[in-house]
Image (cartoon, rainbow, N blue to C red):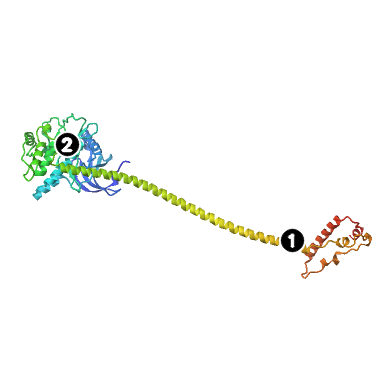
Amino acid sequence: MPSHTEQYEVLGTIGSGSYGKCQKIRRKSDGKVLVWKELDYGTMAEAEKQMLVSEVNLLRELKHPNIVRYYDRIIDRTNTTLYIVMEYCEGGDLASLITKCIKDRRYLEEDFVLRVMAQLALALKECHGRGNGGSTVLHRDLKPANIFLDAKQNVKLGDFGLARILKHETSFAKTFVGTPYYMSPEQMNRMSYNEKSDIWSLGCLLYELCALSPPFTAYNQKELAEKIKEGKFRRIPYRYSSELNTLISRMLHLKDYLRPSVDSILQSTLISSYVAAEQRKAEVRQRRRSDSGQNKHLDAVTAELRLKEQALRERERALKEREERLEQKEQELCIRERLSDEKLARAESLMESYSLMRQQRAPRPLCSDVLGGNENISPGKKKVHFAGDSKENLQPEQKPTVQTQDHMFIKRLQAATTCLGNYPLKSRPLQGLR
């Protein structure tokens, strides 16, 4: 996703030049303080635009603790402006530091100069010895204004606007670029040059850190070129060691092949302890990155486990709620079963009471007297008992209603009819009575 200028807040302007300015900014997403180079490419020639694209590509590829870190680029096509977002160096640049020392009339400590030499040599090694298909990056503009310091006074090599990539070790650049005070004799002579030209510029920079002025000075560029080609300069102040003076003198040798390489400088006993210290720092950073990667992995695993744990808790809570609902339903079923049993018991009791009542209230058959007693009695002498004379028809303590009497009379008649049907006797008198 492309970045936009709205994602940053401008805090102030650090410096300005012919093509743009450098501003201090704050990233709104996390509050990190950075800088961006605001460049107006609308007025640039094609060659300058190509050089600008080259710088952006280089900054993106070069990743080293002693090189200013590249973060992002923003292209504003409406205003033909390019913003290169980079690391913010709180300590300023070496040019400001030298100016301050001149004003305070004091020299820099040799320990600081040696540490700057070690860190710059490591940064140049990253440029000169990149394993990108044998390509070599020449900075071509090493000077105090392009060397920055962070909050811990660590060196950061920046401003690769004049850098050039050489595809092979045998290649030589032929363009005439750079700041005149720090240009090598081969550049002054418009001859081909290689990474040893950056070694010359490094020697000039270290000389100026010690003497607080460049090794070659003049009132015009022609005189300056003559002094550089002659290669004569004064010794650095005697407060600095002869070993440091010798190493700087080797870097400022007129013959480029006699100048030390970056690896030779790093192997020097003068800065070996500083190089070892930087290598230990690099190992610590690597370890931290590794630990950070492991921590991120552990954090991811922990987050995943927490999500799983949360899912299990929710599932457990759902199961518990379901169990509670089942228990509630079971209790309801038990209550309903008990009520059903009570209702059934009441119904059975009522049925028994009703059956007993029916047995108690059941009418005697009308033919009982006829069939009872002496069975040999003649049919003509049979005594007929009417329903009204039976004991069952006597009035109970509670006087039945008319409806109940009618119902009972009908039941008795039906019972009598049934009995008569079961016993096929001569029933002419009965028929006559009916």
Q: Position of residue 330 (x, y in %)?
A: 56, 56
Residue at 72% of width from left, 63% of height from top? Answer: 353
Cα gap from disc 2 to disc 1, whole angstroms: 122 Å
Quarter that holds the C terminus: bottom right
- Residue 412, located in which quarter of the rendered image? bottom right
Q: In the drawing, does residue 240 fall left or right of residue 279?
A: left
Q: Are marks 2 and 1 in contact (CB under 8 Å)?
A: no
Q: Amino acid at mark 1?
A: Ser
Which x, y percent locates residue 387?
85, 64
**Quadrant in which the N terminus is drawn:** top left
* Nearer the observer, 377 or 387: 377
Check residue 145 in the rendering and tell me which mark sits there, or answer none: none
The one of 259 and 215 positioned closer to us in this rendering: 259
User: Residue 352 location, x and y as percent?
Assistant: 72, 61
Q: Secondary structure at mark 1?
A: helix
Q: Which image quarter: residue 234?
A: top left
Q: Left or right of 352: which side holds 417?
A: right
Identify residue for label 2. Answer: 263
> Considering depth in this image, is 416 or 177 the residue closer to the camera?
416
The amino acid marked with disc number 2 is: Asp
Please give the residue where the numbered disc 1 appears in the rendered image: 355
- Residue 224 in sight from this viewpoint: yes
Residue 213 position, x and y percent, is 9, 43
The residue carrying pointer 1 sits among few (fewer than 14), some (14 to 19) or many (20 or more) residues within 10 Å by Cα, namely few
Q: Is residue 147 above or below residue 338?
A: above
Number of other residues with Cα within 10 Å of mark 2, as a class: few under 14, some 14 to 19, many 20 or more:
few
Q: Is residue 197 left or right of residue 29?
A: left
Earlier in the chain: of badge 2 and badge 1, it is 2
For residue 312, above or below residue 190: below
Q: Secondary structure at mark 2?
A: helix
Q: Is residue 59 above or below residue 318?
A: above
Quarter assignment of residue 255: top left
